[in-house]
Image (cartoon, rainbow, N blue to C red):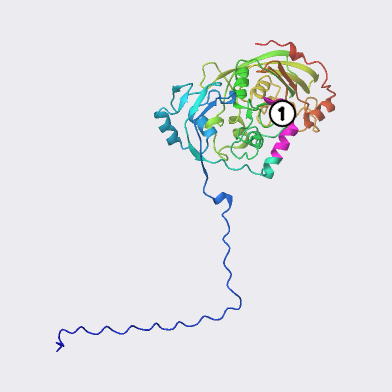
Amino acid sequence: MINPRKQKPAAPAARKPKPKPMDKPLDKPAVAKKVLPKPASEKEPVKVATGVQNLAVTEDEDGMRLDRWFKRRFPTLALSHLAKICRKGEVRLDGKRVETASRIAAGQSVRVPPLSVDAPKAPAVKKPAQSEADARAIKDMVLLEDRDLMVLNKPFGLAVQGGSGTKIHLDGMLASLANERGERPVLVHRLDRDTSGVLLIAKTRKMAADLGEIFRSRSAKKIYWALVEGVPKPSQGRISLYLAKGEAMGDNRAPRGRHGMEERRDIEKMRVAKHGDEDAQHSLTYYAIVDKLSPRCAWLSMKPMTGRTHQLRAHAEAIDCPIVGDPKYGHGDEDRRRRSDPNRNIPDGVDKKLHLLARRLILPHPRGGVVDVTAPLPAHMKRSWELFGFDASQYDPILDAPED
């Protein structure tokens, strides 16, 4: 007989699942969605493993720091990893251990250990329209070009470098000529925005350094042409002055609106200083009259022996013959009296633009030979030359000026 207390209770009956409401009948059979591949820009970078490499330092890389050399050759390599493999001695320079801050020289060999770096991105098929326009504009300025350098004819009004409120400038335009490794031409010297004429550009960092040394050693001869108010005496001379920057130049630039127009003009120009004054630098220019229309104006040829900011403009003002069209220099009492005199003033038909041209540049080429380039008169100066009957082809007496 079975004891009812020990009898296991019967398992509950399994519940039947509730019937799901039927989906509405499909008008069309379901179609699987197609998964599109990610655009190339969104894909994970592909890692590429390299073997041991021994790479030669090129002329353009001469003097570069090792970490910058690696950044240039292997853009995606982390600097922290570079520091690690240098500490371990895996990177060698001519077989010797080296630090990331070490300088390398052309012809040396860098041992690069195996690396895992991102594969280089495919080059863009087409450059932006603005870059192409910049490249065409620069090519139109070329007076001379070889594999190492370009000499441009900079137009009036184009800034050489950027600054406050300057969006378009030649230095920025040169980026349009960068090669596939990102190397781009480099400015060797500067011209004021409103100065026209010869401007030297190096195609590599190494060439820029070599040409810069030529300028610093004063082995480059620069000749400028200017139309000045009045006629200087003597007809050939030497201007030797100490110049210092005005209150609102360089690092001391004052905010706009703080001064009146005339006051601001005075503090945004170079001032004549004394030897020993703070920031005073010596400046030297030789000049010669090529032709004149006395007493109104003279065509000066000028040879600066130093390269101070606004040097020729400040020197012309210092001899009481400011350059025609200069918005900063030549606004003293004597200048106002001359401009109010119908027998001495500049005719109204002359352009108000600065009449200063970087006419000629002569210097030794680092690879041998001589670079000798002449720029033509810009349109506004050409009109003035025709108005006053000056002949741009006549002999330039500044060629006989001293070289020191």
Residue 74, position as x, y percentages in the image = 52, 35
Residue 352 visible in the current orientation: no
Answer whether residue 134 is magenta in the image. Answer: yes
116 or 322, which is in the foreground? 116
Residue 120, position as x, y percentages in the image = 56, 40
Q: Which amino acid does label 1 sit on?
A: Leu
* 122 w.r.t. 14: above or below: above
Q: Mark 1 points at which residue?
A: 152
* 69 w.r.t. 298: above or below: below
Name the residue at 52% across, 45% down: 46
* 34 w.r.t. 312: above or below: below
Q: Quadrant of the N terminus?
A: bottom left
Q: In which quarter of the image is residue 314?
A: top right
Q: Is mark 1 on a helix, strand or loop?
A: strand
Q: Give the range drawn in magenta.
A: 133-154
Please give left or right for residue 356 compared with residue 293 in the image. left
